[in-house]
Amino acid sequence: MTPPSFHRLVDDYLRVRRGLGFDLESTEWKLRDFASYADRIGHSGAVTVELAVEWAQSSRSSNPAQAVRRLAAVRQFARHRALLDPATEVPPAGLLGRIPRRPPPHIYTEAEVAALLQQASRLLPEHGLRPATYVAYFSLLVSTGLRLSEACLLTTNDVDLVNGVLVIRETKFRKSRLVPLHPSTTEALARYADRRNGCRAAPRSEYFFRTERSPRLQRHAVEKTFAGIRQRLGWAGHGRTRQPRIHDLRHTFVTRRLLRWCQDGADVDRKILALATYLGHAKVTDTYWYCTAVPELLGSTSQRFERFAHPALERPS
């Protein structure tokens, strides 16, 4: 009996895990590449440590952490396969080293956000729909903290420009939610919608964000466009914790919101519950993951603690 292909085994694994609520977008890319590698070299039978390590180290990346992350993805897959096939070998943890702690995210300044949008407005074709689309798209991420994929998948029916609300449908952990918009954001999206609807070159599509050549924004196209803008702006990793990423706009949104609440003297413990719902997080701890200790936030929280510890300082003399 011919053993099933690795692509089929990966499909089965992803179906089971996603049925439990896991998104696995990045993991899927890795495992499909692993399956292609196994088929290409003619491997048949169960997962082996040798196969997993060979594939993990075949990455073209010069960063040794990449091989560690690749092996970690296969390890989870192998653990699942071991329940069904006793011949499966599960790579031991730490075999290629430990996954390094994440570098702190980049928190954008207002000037950097303005520079990002300005460069987006200069994209080609000049005066076309594509630059308007990316200005509106990046502006939405800045003002709402949406995930990259959530914004890409918005349809025209998901964007209520009358009531200023977005419908985010079955994203991470298969959860749907409503995202209220600031009036200025709603106005900006309405202007973009008018521009998009007036573009005869844009293909007919149900998706809200589209360009002259694509019925909707694709993740790889967005990341490639952002990488070009980042290069033109000279946003390198030198002097930073890491190169700025699109996902750092989500970190920036959370950090700036927390800073505003601290400055306003709000009850952050209660507010954070609403923020977790707004962001589509399953747990409040997921929201705290996005909080970054920027100097302004540290200063504000230290002042709040000082007032808590020494209430007499607040009394008039």
Image: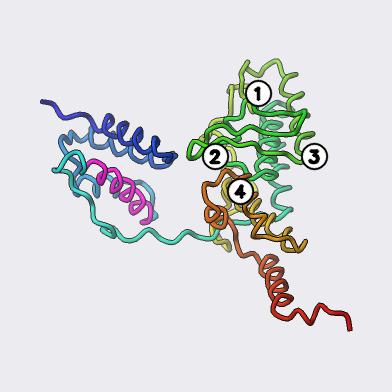
Q: Residue 223 carries which label?
A: 2
Instruction: Using the image, determine if residue 303 lies above or below residue 293.
Output: below
Dot 2 or dot 3: first in sequence order is 3
92 vs 308, nearest the viewer = 308
Q: Distance between the residues labelled 2 and 3?
A: 26 Å
Q: Where is residue 198 drawn, in percent x and y? A: 75, 18
The residue tagged 3 is 184
Please identify, in this view, whether the residue under mark 4 or under mark 1 is nearer the observer: 1
Cα–Cα gap, marks 3 and 4: 19 Å
| Contact? badges 4 and 2 (CB < 8 Å) | no
What stretch of residues is rendered in magenta?
A: 64-81
Separation of marks 4 and 2 at Cα, in angstroms: 15 Å
Q: Can you say whether 313 is above or below 300 in the image?
A: below
Q: Main secondary structure of the magenta part?
A: helix
Q: What element carries label 4?
A: helix
Q: Marks 1 and 3, how far apart in space?
A: 20 Å
Looking at the picture, tell me which residue is in the foreground, 8 or 267.
267
Residue identifier under label 4: 250
Judged by depth in the image, the label closer to the viewer, 2 or 1, is: 1
**Distance Cα–Cα, label 2 vs label 1:** 25 Å
Which residue occupies 39% across, 55% down?
63
Residue 245, horizontal then vertical, whole percent: 56, 49
Q: Residues within 10 Å of mark 3 (few under 14, many from 20)?
A: few
